[in-house]
Image (cartoon, rainbow, N blue to C red):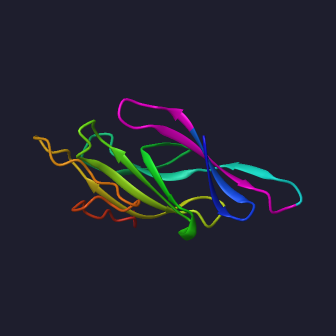
Amino acid sequence: MAVHELAPRVAIVEVLCASGAYQPSHVYLRYDQQGASATATLLEFPVLTSGDGSSIEKSVETEVWGESWFSPDAYEMSVLTLSRQLADCGIWSRYALSGRQPVLTAASARLPCPASQGPPAQFANGNSPLRWPSVSLSK
């Protein structure tokens, strides 16, 4: 479990659900102590997935698979979800955490996975891996 402070008396609590073969899954709660009594809210994420390895679908999930990165100063969280253990393809997503529920603000993907191994994705400071094309969020 990890706690990521967003503001005084407001934090995101990250709870490990599964370690997975090459990436973990987590659930996230917004813990708010600003009111008369503390509240914990299970967060629901708009998640991009690729069941067939080439097309992208959107769903709302409470369990998020992938490596996460937090920027408390910007109220942001990024997640890199890999499609295979080689770490050369998958979907990257960025979320705004300033409201009561996360909002998907940016995404990129490398899909389908290449036939021969490509370079592993670099997930530095929560940014999208280099040369991964942007995904339209207007659907």
Q: Is residue 46 left or right of residue 28?
A: left
Q: Is residue 33 magenta?
A: yes
Residue located farthest toward the bottom when viewing the structure as drawn: 74
Q: Is residue 88 magenta?
A: no
Q: Residue at x 34, y 65 (%)?
A: 136
In this view, 74 is above or below 125: below
Toward which corner of the image does residue 17 lie, by quadrant? top right
- The N terminus is located in which quarter? top right
Q: Residue at x 42, y 46 (%)?
A: 67
In this view, 74 is above or below 90: below
Residue 98 visible within the image: yes
Q: Is residue 101 left or right of residue 109?
A: right
Residue 9 in the image: state x and y as whole percent.
75, 61
Q: Residue at x 41, y 59 (%)?
A: 126
Q: Tally the marks.
A: 0
Query: 112 and 93: which one is in front?
Result: 93
Residue located farthest toward the left when viewing the structure as drawn: 116
- The C terminus is located in which quarter? bottom left
Q: Residue at x 36, y 55 (%)?
A: 92
Q: Is residue 38 left or right of residue 98?
A: right
- Residues shaded magenta: 16-35
Residue 47 in the image: state x and y as whole percent.
45, 51
Residue located farthest toward the right when viewing the structure as drawn: 36
Residue 64 in the image: state x and y as whole percent.
49, 44
